[in-house]
């Protein structure tokens, strides 16, 4: 299952950026964020894979209203799900990090309801067209895992709706910073100084939070001047998580280990 146009991920990761040929060699599976898989489960996942795919930064994995979108797991890099209006205005629905599924919603519809674009160079595992049906039909436990992943993504979308609908600009930015940093921390992608890769720019943040670019810039500077975070050289460091979480009303809990396809 050779990869097409393999490109290194732009952010530093704790595993090789190129998806391995064998699932048992998957670097993501060494992450503390995911549930261990049995040899039989690895064999099943590998049988459902049809290869791997590289998408360069700024490239499109799934187009809006695309027919027959495939199912992917992001192995390395950052991507985003988004929707656009006819005049080009864009809403980023959520950011995809290693281990996240892409294309799941399209397995239940005729066309893609949103697009997926690579923020950095990305590498994806690609699954057969009927992979999802095979899981539900022949591997009930793994089918349940997919349902759990879908429910988790729905809860993230619910939180994002609350953020854009009711939170103030400082609360929105604080929530985004806390959420992303915690996700990166759980994936083992933070450095010894607590900093984490943060390749998204202020336009990404504005499009995710429903803010203007000017308002986003002012809010980020205000929180930085309060000594709550530091953004430098494409990395994020949370300097005062307690206060930042209080502003966002971010209630962290010990997460369940996530399944990994």
Image (cartoon, rainbow, N blue to C red):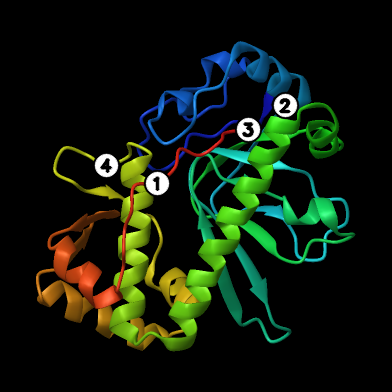
- Between label 4 and label 3, give the one nearer the viewer: 3
Which structural element holds mark 2?
A: strand
Q: CA distance from mark 2 to mark 4?
A: 29 Å
Q: How many marks?
A: 4
Observer-side mark, 2 or 4, equals 4
Q: Position of residue 68 (x, y in %)?
A: 87, 51
Quarter of the image where the N terminus is located: top right
Q: Nearer the viewer, mark 1 or mark 4?
A: 1
Q: Which is more N-terminal, label 1 or label 2?
A: 2
Residue under label 3, please give it.
261
Q: Nearer the viewer, residue 57 or 173?
A: 173
Tell me the distance, in whole angstroms, between the alpha carbons under discs 1 and 4. 17 Å
**Residue 73 visible:** yes
Q: Position of residue 60 (x, y in %)?
A: 67, 54
Task: Give the residue number, with chain letter if any, for mark 1.
Answer: 255
* Quarter of the image where one finds residue 22: top right
Decide: marks 2, 4 in contact (CB < 8 A)? no
Measure the C-alpha gap from mark 1 to mark 3: 18 Å
Q: Which is in the foreground here, disc 1 or disc 3?
A: 1
Residue at disc 4, secondary structure: loop
Q: Position of residue 53 (x, y in %)?
A: 67, 35
Q: Is residue 1 visible?
A: no
Please give the residue where the numbered disc 4 appears in the rendered image: 190
Disc 2/disc 1 C-alpha distance (Å): 30 Å
């Amino acid at each position: 299952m050779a990869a097409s146009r393999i490109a290194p991920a732009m952010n530093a990761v704790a595993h090789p950026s190129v998806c391995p040929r064998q699932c048992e060699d998957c670097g993501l599976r060494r992450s503390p964020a995911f549930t261990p898989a049995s040899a039989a489960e690895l064999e099943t996942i590998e049988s459902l894979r049809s290869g791997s795919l590289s998408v360069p930064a700024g490239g499109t994995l799934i187009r809006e209203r695309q027919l027959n979108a495939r199912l992917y797991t992001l192995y390395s890099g950052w991507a985003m799900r988004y929707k656009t209006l006819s005049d080009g205005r864009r809403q980023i629905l959520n950011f995809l990090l290693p281990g996240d599924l892409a294309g799941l919603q399209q397995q239940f519809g005729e066309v893609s309801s949103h697009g997926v674009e690579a923020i950095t160079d990305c590498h994806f595992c690609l699954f057969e067209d009927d992979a999802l049906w095979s899981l539900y039909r022949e591997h009930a436990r793994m089918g349940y895992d997919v349902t759990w992943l879908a429910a988790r993504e729905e809860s993230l979308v619910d939180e994002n709706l609350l953020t854009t609908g009711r939170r103030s600009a400082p609360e929105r930015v604080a929530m985004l910073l806390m959420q992303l940093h915690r996700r990166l921390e759980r994936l083992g992608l933070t450095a010894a100084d607590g900093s984490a890769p943060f390749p998204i720019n202020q336009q990404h943040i504005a499009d995710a939070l429903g803010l203007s670019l000017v308002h986003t810039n002012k809010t980020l500077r205000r929180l930085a001047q309060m000594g709550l975070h530091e953004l430098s050289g494409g990395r994020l460091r949370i300097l005062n998580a307690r206060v930042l979480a209080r502003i966002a009303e971010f209630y962290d809990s010990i997460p369940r280990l996530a399944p990994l396809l």
